[in-house]
Amino acid sequence: MNKVVLIGRLTKDAELMQLEGKERGVLRFTLAVDRRFSNNSGGKEADFIPVRYWSDFGHKIQPYLLKGKLIGVSGKVSTRSYTTDESAKRYVTEIEADNIQFLERKKEDIV
């Protein structure tokens, strides 16, 4: 089974890469996920996890995926490799999201 559920904050605004001539595109962002325990000096540490989300309506949710927003993501771990122009092999591990959940409300919505 390959299933991942993460809660974290966006490290920067999400980027939308639209496929040419199609409605389908991919949202790409990095999620900062806090670790459960503090480090030796008492500070919190986080893991920075790259996420991509394929969607036909990415342009509708992109304006809400802003730096610092708390979101939940579920999906699967995806790995791939590629060769650079200098013939070096690179490996990429990222989350391929199938669901994004907004976990904060705007301050003006709170009564």
Image (cartoon, helix red, strand yellow):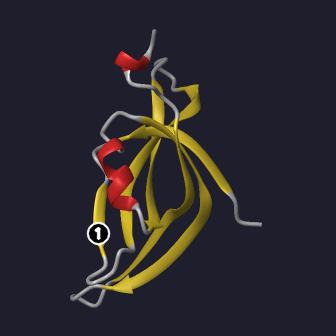
In the image, 102 versus 3, the foreground residue is 102
In the image, 111 versus 33, the foreground residue is 111
Side of 71 where 59 appears, left or right = left
Q: How many marks?
A: 1
Tell me residue 104's x, y (percent): 47, 28
Callout 1, which amino acid? Met
Q: Quadrant of residue 72?
A: top right
Q: Residue at (35%, 17%) from the top-left corner?
A: 108
**Secondary structure at numbered mark 1:** strand
Position of the N terminus, as image quadrant, is bottom right
Side of 63 where 82 appears, left or right = right
Classify mark 1: residues with Cα within 10 Å, few (<14), some (14-19) or many (20+): some
The residue singled out by tag 1 in the image is 17
In the image, 18 versus 94, the foreground residue is 18
Q: Residue furthest right?
A: 1
Q: Residue furthest top?
A: 111
Instruction: Establish if 57 lies above or below 103.
Output: below
Q: Residue furthest left?
A: 85
Q: Residue at (39%, 34%) from the top-left corner?
A: 69
Tell me residue 27's x, y (percent): 37, 61
Instruction: Establish if 104 lies above or below 83.
Output: above
Q: Residue at (51%, 23%) from the top-left corner?
A: 40
Tell me residue 79's x, y (percent): 53, 74
In the image, 63 versus 28, the foreground residue is 63
